Amino acid sequence: MFNIPFLDLPPLRAALGTVTLPGSKSISNRILLMAALAEGRTEIHGLLAADDTQVMLESLRTLGVQWTRDGDTVTVDGMGGRVPQAQADLFLGNAGTAMRPLAAALALMAARYGGDYQLRGVPRMHERPIRDLVDALRGLGCQVDCLAQAGYPPLRLTGPSSLHLDTPVRVRGDVSSQFLTALLMALPLVAQRDVVVEVEGELISKPYIDITLALLGRFGVRVQRDGWQRFTIPAGSRLQSPGRIHVEGDASAASYFIALGALAALGEPLRIEGVGSDALQGDVRFADAAAAMGADIRLEPNALLVQRGRWPLRGIEWDCIAIPDAAMTLAVMALFADGPSKLTGIGSWRVKETDRIAAMATELRKLGATVDEGPDWIRVEPLREWRPASIRTYDDHRMAMCFSLAALNPLGGHGAAPVRIEDPACVAKTYPDYFETFFGLVQADAADVPVICIDGPTASGKGTLADELAQALGFWVLDSGALYRATAWAALQAGLDLNDEAAVAPLAATLPLRFAGGQVYLGEENVTEALRQEAVGLGASTVAALPAVRQALHALQLGFRRVPGLVADGRDMGTAIFPDAPLKVFLTASAAQRAQRRHKQLIFKGVSANIEGLLADLEARDLRDKTRSASPLKPAQDARLLDNSDLTIEASVDQVLAWWADQRPF
Ligand SMILES: Nc1ncnc2c1ncn2[C@@H]1O[C@H](COP(=O)(O)OP(=O)(O)O)[C@@H](O)[C@H]1O
Ligand SMILES: Nc1ccn([C@@H]2O[C@H](COP(=O)(O)OP(=O)(O)O)[C@@H](O)[C@H]2O)c(=O)n1
C-alpha cells in the first residue's frame, strides 16, 4: 500500500492483463456477522482484507466471538444466537457496513438478554445519519441512546426490555438500504414468531437487499418478500452455518477495471476475475452503464472481459439508484465521452464517506471539466484540455480509485497531464493494493514516466537517498551498481579475468538477476550480502569500465522505468541511461567523510575495516570511475549538485524532494 501523502500518476495510454478482485466488502461483513451470530463453525474463503472487515473482526473478538485467520480464509465459531460479552465498547472507524448491522444485532441482544454496548467511530461516522434504524429499533422496544446528537452515532444500546414483535417493524428505505439489511440480519435472533418488516418510502439500492436475502438463505433463513415493501422472517428461523462459504469479488471495485478496459484495452480485453454473470451484487449492473457508454463487455460466470468498443465513449443519462457506489466511476468516464452525461438517483452520495456529489464536482473541475450538480444528480461535460491536478480524496477510497482513471487523459484529449492522488492510503478501506494492481495493468510512454537520477561517487549516500526518495514518492528504485556488482561476482565465481571484456560481457547480458523484497537474487541464490563486499565493489568498478559490459546492461536498466516512476542510483544514470530524466542529482561528499561513512557501515555489519584502507580504495575507485572512457563518472550538464558532507540524511532527502516539488505542475 502507498502510505504516503500523495501519489503522482503519469499520463497513461493503454491497459492489458488480468486482475483478480478482492472480496466484496458488503458481502464480507454480512457473512462475518451472520457467521458470528449463527450456530456452528463457518469457514469463510476469499474474505476481503481491508480496514472495514478488520473493524468487524475486531469488534466480534471484543464481543467474545472466536475466530482464526489463515491467509484469506477466516474461520468463525458462531455464538449460536447469544453474544458472550454483555458489555462492550466498540470502535468502528468509518465502516457503515459494521455500524448498522452491529447496532441492530446488539440492540436486540441487549433487549432480550440484558446488556450495555457502545458503538462509536471516526468523526465522519458521527455525521452519517442512522436515525431511521434507531427509530425502527425503538419501535421494536429496544433501548437506543444517541450519545452526541439525535439520529447519529455514537450509540448506546442497553437492556433488558420487552420487544414488540407482534406488530410489523417499520423502517424507512429511502435513505439507505443498510438499515433494512441490518434488521433482516438481526431479527432471526428473536424470531420465535413470524416477524414482519415494513418499508416506508421507496426502497433504494434494492440489489443490496437481494444480497442480504441470498446470504440469509445460505445461513438457513428464508425471508418471504412481498414486493419491496414487506418482508417476513418466518417463526423458528435460526441462523445456521453453511459450513464453508466463498466471498464473491467486489463488484464496485470491478467498476474501475471495467472503465479501464473500456478506455484503454485496445488490442485484447482486460480480464477481471471474481465477478461475472453469476454475481449476487447489484453493482455488476455497472457493466450495463459502461456498455451503454460504449464498452465492449463479455460476461463469463465468474469473470468479465472488457475492451474498448465505441470511441469516444457515448455520453449517457443514467439512473444510478441501483449502483450508487460504482456510479462514481461513470462520472470520471464521462470526461472521455462525445457529449455530456447526467447521473441521477445519487442522493445517497451525500451521506457516504464524504459528500460525494460535492467532492466529485470539485475535483472534476480541477481537471478542467464543466460540471453541474443538484441534490441527487451530477452532470459532466467531456474534457479535451486536461489540466494537471492534485485530487483531494476526502478520506474516501472511491474518490482515490475512480480518479486514478483520469491519468488516462492522453486518450481523451490533447496533450498528456499527470494526476496527483492525495492520501492514496485511503483505499485501505476496501482495497489496500488498488494502486499496485492498477500499475500492473497500465502502460505509459517511457518518456512520460518520471525518473529521478542520483549519481555520484561511492559512499556519498546515493543508495540511502534513492531508497528514501522512492519511499516518499511511491516510486521504484534501480540500484544500478548492483548490476555491475552482480556481473563482477558472477565473473569471479566463474573464474574469469575481470578485464576480459569478451568473456565478461556475455555474462552481463544474460544475468538471471532479480530484485524482490529488498533482496537481490541471481537465479535462485540470494546474493544481497555477497554483493555488498568491498572486493565485489572494486571488481564492479573494473568490469564497469568495459564498454561491452555497459552496453549489455543498458536495456536491462531501461526496463526499470515503470509506472508510477523511478529513482535510479548510479554513476551514469543522468548522463547515459536516462538523459531525459526531469531531475538529476549529483551527490558528493568529501573523500574523508565517505570513508568514515563506509567504515561505520561496515563496523555496524560486523565487518572489520580500517579507515585508511577504505579511503585508499575509494579514491582508487573514484579515479577509475572518473577516468574510464565509457560513461565516466561526471555530473550531467543539467544535474543539480548536492554536497552532503555536512548534511544529515533527512536534510538531503528534503532538499531533493523540494527540487522535485518545484518541477511538478501541481
Ligand atoms: N547525508 C548523509 N549523512 C550522513 N551519513 C550518510 C548520509 N547519506 C548516507 N549516509 C550513510 O553513508 C553510508 C553510505 O551510504 P550509501 O547510501 O550506501 O552510499 P552509496 O550508495 O553512495 O555508496 C550509509 O551508512 C548511510 O547511512
Ligand atoms: N551506473 C553505474 C553504477 C555503478 N557503476 C560501477 O559499479 C561500482 C559499484 O557500484 P555501487 O553503486 O554499488 O557502489 P557504491 O557506490 O555503493 O560503492 C561502482 O564503483 C562503479 O564503478 C557504474 O559504473 N555505473
Image (cartoon, grey):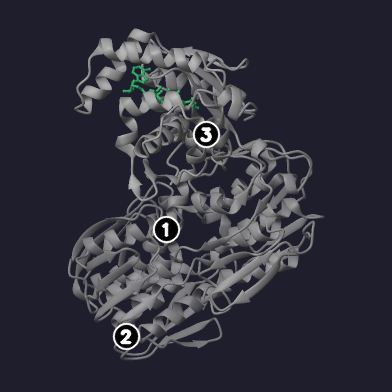
**SS of the residue under disc 1:** loop
Which one is in front, 81 or 651?
Answer: 651
Image quarter for ligand 2 equals: top left
Q: Nearer the viewer, mark 3 or mark 2?
A: 3
Q: Position of residue 595 (x, y in %)?
A: 32, 13
Name the residue at the right extreme.
338
Q: From where the camera sits, is residue 662 visible?
A: yes
Residue at 39% from the left image edge and 56% from the top image edge: 50
Q: Earlier in the sequence, mark 3 or mark 2?
A: 2
Given this view, does label 2 or label 1 mark the residue nearer the observer? 2
- Amino acid type of the residue that numbered disc 3 sits on in the rendered structure: Ala
| Quarter of the C terminus within the rendering | top right
Residue 227 against residue 374 in the figure, above or below: below
Occupied quadrant, residue 499: top left
**Which residue is labeled 3 in the image?**
502
Q: Position of residue 497 (x, y in %)?
A: 41, 30
Dot 2 or dot 1, earlier in sequence: 1
> Label 1 amino acid?
Gly
Q: Which residue is mark 2?
A: 191
Q: Earlier in the sequence, mark 1 or mark 3?
A: 1
The amino acid at mark 2 is Ala
Residue 268 horizontal/vertical position (percent): 68, 63
Regarding residue 361, the answer to whether it shows in the image is no
Distance from label 1 to label 3 (Cα)? 79 Å
- Assign a secondary structure to mark 2: loop
Figure label count: 3
Q: Which residue carries the number 1 mark?
A: 151
